[in-house]
Image (spheres, grey):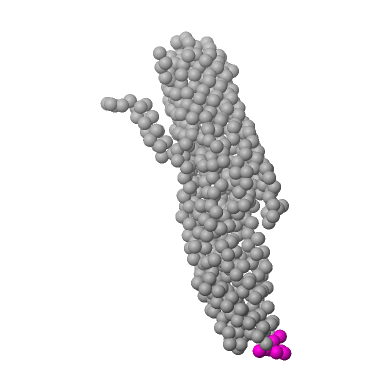
Amino acid sequence: MAGRSPLAALLVGLAAAAIAGAPPVTAQDQDARLPETGQLWFQMTGVLLNWNSQFAEGSDSILDGEREPLTSHFDGDLSARLYPSAYLSEDFNVGAAALGIPVLEDGDLTLGDMGFSTMRAQERVLGLGLEYGVFDWLSVGLRAPFRHTDVETTLHFDSTTAAFTWGDLAIENQQQFLNGSADALTQLQALIDGGALVGPDLEAASALLAGSQAFFGAISDMAQPDRVFPVRQSLRGLLLLANLGQLQEEFGALGISLPDMDLVQLAGEANLMRIFEDGFIRAEVPGRARNGISVGALEFSARLRAVDQISRRGEDRGPGLFRFRTAVGGLVRMPTRDPNGAPIHDPDNFLDIPVASGHPELELTLYQDVLIGKTVFLRFRGQYTMRRPVAAVLRVAPPDQPYAHERLKRIMNIYPGDVLALQVRPSLLIAQGFSAGLDYDYYSVPATSYELIEPLEGLYAGIDASELSLETTQTRHRIGLGFVLDITEARGRASDRTAGPTRNPWQFAVSIRRAFSGSGGRTPTSHHFSVAIRTPIALF
């Protein structure tokens, strides 16, 4: 090809794809091979993960382990997704008796339905790494994963289903109504004090004054930005207007005029904006959440060769049907970003996917390759990742009530579980250096523990961080196809009569996997597509 080699074209293509983004990859190594002494490898891994569902746990309508939409934790009536929403009902119930309307029971508070279009999450990573052969049996490496995350959805708020709005939005010309009511109460007080009323009329007027003061006092208390108020179309709104009409008749009989209360008919879009932007939550309205390309951590690694009967030629390969190549590795993953803010974590964005965990991690890996005869190749990788605790700012809330009150945004200690990941790639050597076969991976992590540094007080006393641990125990199985083109293996097999190790370990691998089983509630049913390249760099 004129102007550009196939390898250069492929590298450029991968880089262009990575600019659009790619997600966390478990490792950059495709097999147990190490670079020879003094040899430097350049490794590039591009990964794309996308999903629009998760494996359910504790769902009312979906069996555990079945797929449920990502929207299942976010949609439905807004009040049912708030945490905690009980105090809104409690504040309303304080004034309900004075207003002569029913108190709120469980499920009575409705603030409008939140409907989402299909929620789609995508994570992309471009991992760039170098590995250097210190000795024939030891290599060291450095890797930087460039990550990009994106969650896309469209929110539709149905205000026609809302029986309540926020107090300061509920009454048109609110201050005019409150001032007119206060004037009427002043006139009634003056009438009582003036002595014109005696006997039963005075008693009735005094009772009317006391009841009216409680009535309008409750309205004034509830007409606040952080209190709920019934809209005109609701049962409680109609009862409230009827009770006001009764008072207007009684005041009118005494020659005093009470103003009309113009309740809003529907909650409107402002109902949603207020609760997220200025009121209960003070966070972003759920929509698109995107983190641009960022390096969330740097990875420092070392690998040791234990056995290699595959890469070498002639007698070094050893006799027998089975030939083995074994290596062990260790990796330290150090965060490069503050875990208390984007792009690691944003407590004010409920759809955010972090570009990194924010935890320092130590990862131990076993690499095992097995060549059976001349046609069957088995690659196995087992990883155990130990994640260190970290302190970060989160909102305390269970998974199905994600919209937590601003006062529940606290700094806390996070104790993540250790991760076990396995990958098995049985394949057939179709041609020299080219293999194709199945690709299976398993992922498991126990529950993450959370600990508030300072306990919650007041209305939130008794709430602890254990709510955040729900649905953090996760398992996932994926299976698909894998293809590997390995120039080293092709040259090694073609030159079997030549002594000494093979050189130029150029490798190109593609993997496509789909999640078919899992558990945990928030475990993504992700599709995985990856492309990996490994090629030597001449230092001298």
Residue 111 placement (x, y as % from top left): 56, 64
Q: Nearer the viewer, residue 301 or 522?
A: 301
Residue furthest out toward the top = 499
Asked whether residue 442 is in view, the answer is: no
Q: Which residues are magenta?
A: 196-203
Residue 448 placement (x, y as % from top left): 65, 41
Is residue 403 depicted above or below 218 in this figure? above
Residue 519 placement (x, y as % from top left): 61, 45
Residue furthest out toward the left = 2
Is residue 142 depicted above or below 452 in this figure? above
Q: Is residue 198 magenta?
A: yes
Q: Nearer the viewer, residue 451 or 119?
A: 451
Relative horizontal placement of residue 87, taking residue 288 as reference (left or right): right
Is residue 38 depicted above or below 20 in this figure? above
Relative horizontal placement of residue 494, taking residue 476 as reference (left or right): left
Q: In terms of image quadrants, where is residue 74?
A: bottom right
The residue that appears at 39% across and 33% down in the rendered structure is 15
What secondary structure prevails in the magenta region? Answer: helix
Q: Quarter of the image for the N terminus: give it.
A: top left
Asked whether residue 460 is in view, the answer is: yes
The residue that appears at 63% across and 62% down in the rendered structure is 88
Q: Is residue 63 magenta?
A: no
Residue 381 placement (x, y as % from top left): 57, 29
Count numbered badges in the picture.
Answer: 0
The residue that appears at 40% across and 37% down in the rendered structure is 19
Q: Nearer the viewer, residue 519 or 433?
A: 519
The residue that appears at 51% across and 41% down in the rendered structure is 343
Relative horizontal placement of residue 323, taking residue 447 as reference (left or right): left
Is residue 498 depicted above or below 204 in this figure? above
